Image (cartoon, helix red, strand yellow):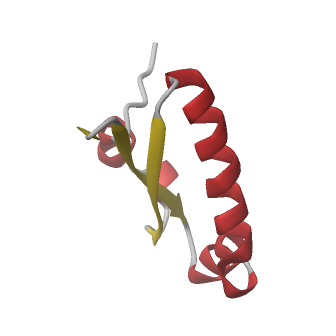
């Protein structure tokens, strides 16, 4: 979505367990904050516009084994 020359990008990061979610987020959210900052900078360089990243980490057990979910995420098989 683009609003007033700013791209809004919603990102969902799926993990299998709550313990993995804690690892991705990091202590006091610092790891996720740094990942988001670096990603935003790179995307802004590519798009030549300001970017707002809305990043969420969600627990979805065994998501990588569920065909329906993989299809929803855009995975394709040959």
Q: Is residue 38 above or below residue 12?
A: above
Which residue is at 58% across, 23% downward? 46
Q: Position of residue 35 (x, y in %)?
A: 69, 56
Of 41 and 16, nearer the camera is 41
- Quadrant location, the N terminus: top left
Of 15 and 44, nearer the camera is 44
Q: Is residue 78 above or below residue 34?
A: above
The reply, left or right, for residue 76 in relation to residue 28 is left
Of 62 and 52, nearer the camera is 52
Which residue is at 65% across, 41% downward? 41
Residue 19 found in image quarter: bottom right
> Which residue, as the protein is rendered here, is positioned at the far top?
78
> Which residue, as the protein is rendered here, is positioned at the far front?
4
Q: Is residue 58 above or below residue 64?
A: below
Q: Position of residue 66 (x, y in %)?
A: 39, 50
Which residue is at 50% across, 60% downward? 14
Q: Position of residue 5 (x, y in %)?
A: 33, 35
């Amino acid at each position: 979505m683009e609003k007033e020359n700013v791209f809004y990008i919603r990102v969902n990061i799926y993990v299998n367990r709550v313990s993995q979610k804690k690892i991705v987020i990091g202590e006091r959210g610092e790891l996720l904050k740094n990942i988001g900052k670096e990603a935003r900078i790179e995307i802004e360089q590519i798009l030549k516009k300001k970017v707002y990243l809305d990043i969420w980490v969600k627990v979805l057990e065994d998501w990588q084994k569920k065909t329906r979910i993989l299809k929803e995420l855009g995975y394709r098989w040959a």
